[in-house]
Image (cartoon, rainbow, N blue to C red):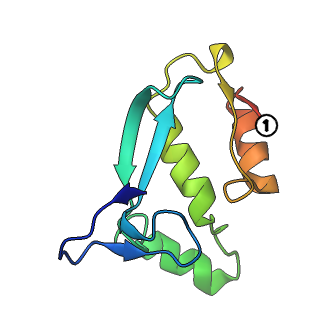
Amino acid sequence: MVRYFGRHGCKMYMKGKPVKFGYKLWILSSFDGYPFYIIPYQGSQKENGSENSSERLETTMGSRKEKKKLSQTVVENLLSVVETTTKHKIYMDNFLTSYNLFVSLRDKRFSAT
């Protein structure tokens, strides 16, 4: 959370946090805090805008596409810039962890805790 007290529509309020007002950022950083990739929080979004005809057909046929959680989408977007997956270890807090995320990271050869 980047502290900000001015007036702006993207400013967020988080009750019970040390920094209550500001901009929320998702950051891929090194173990010593050096930021490599930053994504500003933009609220809920659809992944590809609107569904195409093949997705509508799959929905009507009864096979549903697996819906990803926000945490999984954020982590996968942050890690999309990493070129050599075996040289990196991923550490995250309990907000970002889920079983499906760890399965996805294992398939991409990331070590995650």
Residue at image position (55%, 55%) is 73
Q: Residue at x 38, y 64 (%)?
A: 48
Nearest the viewer among 90 and 46 is 90
Q: Is residue 25 visible?
A: yes
Task: Give the percent coordinates (x, y) of residue 26.
Answer: 46, 50
Direction bottom: furthest residue: 60
Secondary structure beneath dot 1 equals loop
> Where in the figure is residue 5, as x and y percent of width and height?
26, 70
Q: Which of 104 and 20 is in front in this view?
A: 20
Pick out the residue farthest to the left.
7
Q: In which quadrant is the C terminus drawn?
A: top right
Location of the N terminus (image quadrant): bottom left
Label 1 Cα neighbours within 10 Å, binned few <14 / some 14-19 / many ≥20: few
Q: Is residue 64 left or right of residue 3?
A: right
Tell which of 111 and 62 is nearer to you. Answer: 111
Does any portion of residue 52 appear in the rendered image? no
Q: Is residue 74 above or below residue 7?
A: above
Q: Classify residue 57 as left or right of residue 111.
A: left
Q: How many numbered circles does the render carry? A: 1
Q: Give residue 46's quadrant in the image.
A: bottom left
Q: Position of residue 2 (x, y in %)?
A: 36, 55
Q: Residue at x 50, y 80 (%)?
A: 56
Picture quarter containing residue 42?
bottom left
- Circle 1: residue type: Thr
- For label 1, the residue is 113
Q: In this view, does 105 lie above or below 84?
A: below
